[in-house]
Amino acid sequence: MHILHVVGARPNFMKAAPVYRACVARGIRQTIVHSGQHYDANMSDIFFTQLGIPQPDFNLEVGSGSHAQQTATIMQRMEPIVIEQRPDWVLVYGDVNSTLAGTIVCSKLGQLVAHVEAGLRSFDRTMPEEINRLLTDQVADLLFTHSEEAAENLTSEGVAAERIHFVGNVMIDTLIRLLPQCEPPQFPGVNGRYVLVTLHRPSNVDNPAALHQIMRALERVDQSLAVIFPVHPRTRRRLEEQAYKIDNPQLHLIEPLGYQEFIGLQRNATAVITDSGGVQEETTFLQIPCLTLRSNTERPVTVTIGTNKLIGSDPDRIISEINAILAGNGKKGAIPTLWDGHAGERIVDILMASHL
Ligand code: UD1
Ligand code: UDP
């Protein structure tokens, strides 16, 4: 059997790693295609090293661009590779533009496609990811889900039950495997408790007023807390555009971190403030209070079962929620079903069974 993995953006690498490892353990031939959607060393290369994935066999070097440019260029550059490789299965991960582009190319070539992390829905079509999720799930042949509600979403869209497999959470596979090696890096001036921040959703960072308001709130958190903010390149660009000035030594804006460093910080944080999809899940597993600066989530299990709270981006609410956590009233949670470190193995076993 030959499996071709399509990856491209930071969250894809944590999801592909456990599937890649499960394939290695079963002696399966593999090809990795990297779209090049993310290309900075600390948004891409570092994860291949830390997660133990080999260098991609193909890098399409698409780089940044509008949605149409990025998606179309990935499609054009991927098609000849898939025609030449003719894998038995193509695996696409998550909800980024590389996911959708890979799915369209392969399904039109008659290649079998499996979507890992299928069925997530925010029901908010202003999010580019929601469009990618809806379209990918319509045409992929097999849909691997990480929560019961994801299967319900698919069923309500008319997807046949035999295409859906509830396998658990691959991102948590990576977390469980690497957690013993994840220690927080030291920062000058940070000796005690801290809040960890990550933000990159266009709805929060592409609107100058919204971003300004969130930054002001981060500068107002209780003096007993440092604020450590590894800044995503989209957000960095937006802060530079508005020449945002920080004169508060409590707030540490740093470059995006490697996986081990970032998980090391998450596991020891007093609270995490985020709009990331994956971070909502990781904090639930780590049982760290998570304040999500959004009004919806495609991962409701992190709210109903986990430690996640959707709080929007009102500055007073951000401050009052942090104060509640400091007062010992952070949200407690449990770990969702099948977030157990074995999702990647289940996926590969199902693919092998489907191949017979
Ligand atoms: C993308 C995904 C988003 C995912 C996020 C994870 C889509 C539509 N969006 O958003 O779902 O949550 O990745 O991080 O697929 N840039 C760099 N260096 C890089 C990559 C990007 O400087 O290595 C800058 C460029 O200015 C670029 C901007 O970041 O224009 C945005 O990158 P892009 O991949 O388009 O979207 P993300 O916001 O990263
Ligand atoms: N992450 C990281 N370094 C950082 C910020 C995030 O390694 O500086 C990891 C995080 O632990 C999670 C993944 O990146 O595993 C989430 O990716 P991201 O937030 O970029 O995308 P999303 O999940 O929102 O699609």
Image (tube, grey):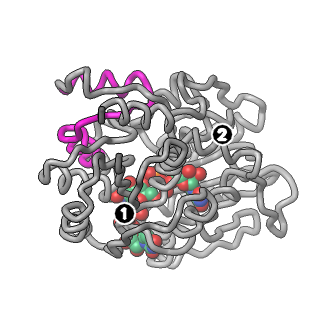
Q: Is residue 112 left or right of residue 58?
A: left
**Residue that label 2 marks:** 176
Residue 145 in percent (x, y) is at 39, 31
Q: Amino acid at mark 1?
A: Val
Residue at (52% x, 31% y) in the render: 302
- The residue positioned 59% from the left and 34% from the top of the image is 341
Q: Position of residue 227 (x, y in %)?
A: 70, 57
In this view, 306 is above or below 89: above
Q: In the depicted view, which residue is nearer to us: 246 or 82?
A: 82
Which disc, if any, is residue 33?
1
CA distance for labels 2 and 1: 25 Å
Figure disc tally: 2
Image point 47% across, 42% down: which residue?
A: 312
> Which numbered disc flags the more N-terminal residue, 2 or 1?
1
Where 328 sits versus 57, above or below? above
* Residue 106 horizontal side relative to residue 356, left or right: left
Residue 81: horizontal and vertical position, in percent? 25, 66
Question: Callout 2 environment at 10 Å: few (<14), some (14 to 19), or many (20+)?
Answer: some
| Main secondary structure found in the magenta portion | helix
Please report the residue visible at 61 percent of the width from the left and 54 percent of the height from the top. Answer: 197
Is the residue under label 1 in contact with that under label 2 (CB below 8 Å)? no
Q: Is residue 138 magenta?
A: yes
Q: Amino acid at mark 2?
A: Ile
Numbered range of the magenta stretch: 130-157
From the Cβ of disc 1, is ligand 1 less than 8 Å away?
no
Who is closer to the viewer here, 254 or 34? 34
The answer to if 188 sits in the magenta stretch is: no
Q: Position of residue 260 (x, y in %)?
A: 68, 56
